[in-house]
Each structure stands twice: as C-alpha cells, then as structure tokens.
Image: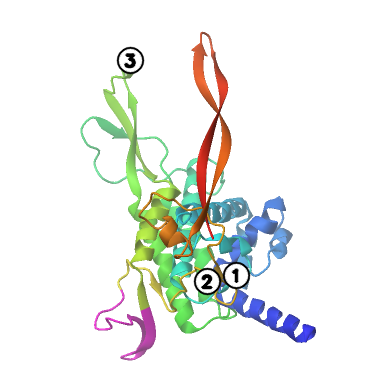
Amino acid sequence: MALIRHCVTLLLILCCSRLCGAIQWLGLTVNGSRVAWNESEHCRLLDGLVPEQSQLCKRNLELMQSVVNAAKQAKLTCQMTFSDMRWNCSSVENAPNFTPDLSKGTRESAFVYALASATISHTIARACASGELPTCSCGATPAEVPGTGFRWGGCGDNLHYGLNMGSAFVDAPMKSSKSGGTQATKMINLHNNAVGRQVLMDSLETKCKCHGVSGSCSVKTCWKGLQDLPHIANELKSKYLGATKVIHRQTGTRRQLVPRELDIRPVRESELVYLVSSPDYCAKNPKLGSYGTQDRVCNKTSVGSDSCNLMCCGRGYNAYTETIVERCQCKYYWCCYVMCKKCERTVERYVCK
C-alpha cells in the first residue's frame, strides 16, 4: 500500500508539473539563485523548462538573473496582494511543483499567470534602464511632442525589450509541442499571460524631475516609466475578482474560449479567464489545493475579506495579546543623528479557530 501511495503521489506531481509548466520558472528562486549565469551549462540545472526556454537561457545568459529576480518578485507580490483573503497565494512557494489551486485552470492560477507574465517583462524593462543588462539600454524617446514646460530626457524603462523577451520566455511552454496540458489549458494560459502584459503596458506613465533655481521647477525633464508591481498586481486583482469562467468549444472552423454563462459574446482581451471553479478555501484539503484558514490572523473591526467573519468562515476566532517594542520619542540632534527611546505597547490579535 505504501508503494502504491508513493506511485500515486509521483503521478500527481508529474501531471501537475505538465499542466502548469508555464509557471514552473517561478521555481528558479530555488536553484537559480545559486548560479553565476556565466556558462550555458548552467541552463541544465533548471528543472521543468521546455526546450525552447532552455535555448532562450543559453542564448541570453545575461538575462537570467533578471528572470530569477522576477520569480522572487512575482511570489512576494502575489502573497502581499492576497494577504487579506482566504486564498493567500502561499502555494506559489511550492514552485516548480504546484498544488491543484494553481494547476487546474482556476481563477487563482489565472491571476498568477498574468502576474508572472507582467513581472518578468517589468523586471527586464527596469533592468535595461538601470544598466544591468548589456543587451539593452533606456527606452526609446517618446514620439509624442513634449508639452509646455518639460522636455524628454532621463532614462525610461525599456518596455519594448521587456515585452519581447518576457513573452518569449513565459509563452514558450504553451507553444511547445513537448509540453503537457490540454489545448484549452494552453489557450487560457496564453490569454491570461497577455492580460498581464496589457496591464503592464497600461501602467506606463510620464515621470518627471524638476530643474531650476531653489527647486523652482522652471524646467522639467520627463521620461516614460512603469508603475511599481504592487499597483499592477492590484489592477490584476480587480480582474481576478471579475474573472470569467469559460468553456472550450467548436466555433465555426476552430475551437475557441467562450464564456460559460454568456456564450453569445466572445471572451474579451482585457478579462482574466478560468476553466474550473475554486473551493472556498475554508478547510484544509490537499486534493483541492486548499490550505484552510485555521490559525490565520483576521481583523475584528473590518467588513472586508480580512474580517474575522469571512476569514474564519464562521468558525469563530481566538483573541490574544502581544507586547511589541518600537522606537518612540525620537529627537533630532544637530548634526546629524537621531536618538529614540524604546517603548512597549500591548496589542490585541485575533486568530481563526
């Protein structure tokens, strides 16, 4: 029996890996951080990449540190964005092996695919502007005529290069003949990847720096820069909350994704899509990829998703007090240091039963 259970576990892991191969690169935080990325042989150390991604790695070694950084940022940003909800993205730490919440075409996997796609292009674009990559530099000067009182200058994020390299890497598994997953799964993954990149493109804004005597800002130098990842993640979270459940069916001469409830219209390019409904994530259930909310911190006074009523799923909560030490009564002394006292205060915490 033990042998059978072991074999079943291995089979589940293999199936999961094949289905969610497009985000297996998030596992680069496990082994990619220990690599110097100065030899093509290092690409062989990466588990789960399809041949096309391995080739991209070998041809663009200088890019791989940015890819590793993007994997770290995607994980951290996902967990921060969903820290107030029952599903808190903790399962992303399992990369490159994922639980069912991220391997079966759920609403949660739609968000992670979109965020990962946006993050890798964002990280590469920023790396170009900061001079970290020898293959690219600042973004192109905008074609639009500058307004009154400012001129184009500075070093803008190279969104064009970031999108090209990022999409080539994250879309490769869905376009590879050697990757697993159904056609429907590949289609929704490609769609959600594109949604992530569109939100990234929409975040490009004009940023300026003032010049002039005594900060008069008589002249401004401006460039195009991307907003930070938390902003992009929050935009995607809104799309996650309004995501559309779809089916994969024959439409004319080809199979397409159409909304399950409103199949009279095509899927919009701006909306996240998913195939499988999610559990409520209240109780721990490994088969569904649910960690449950027992022992999660909740907010007694909130009426949102982090409220004790919603977070604890009606099971109730326990209260306890905690003493924290923090800096207080700080004074600035000329020149040039600050001295503070240490103060203790007691706070009340609430944890789901």
Query: Amino acid type of disc 2?
Result: Asp
Label at residue 266: none
Say which quarter of the image contains residue 223: top left
- Residue drawn at x 51%, y 19% is 330
Query: Amino acid type of disc 3?
Result: Ser
Whole-percent x, y for residue 8 in the image? 69, 83
Is 145 rendered above or below residue 221? below
Region rendered in magenta: 246-267
Q: What residue would you read off at disc 1? A: 98
* Local secondary structure at mark 2: helix
Label at residue 101: 2
Q: Which of marks 3 and 2 is nearer the N terminus?
A: 2
Q: Are marks 1 and 2 in contact (CB under 8 Å)?
A: yes
Toward the viewer: 184 or 333? 333
Is 100 rendered above or below residue 344? below
Calculate the distance from the C-alpha at mark 1 to the C-alpha at mark 2. 8 Å
Q: Earlier in the sequence, mark 3 or mark 1?
A: 1
Label at residue 214: 3
Query: Does the segment drawn in magenta span residue 165?
Result: no
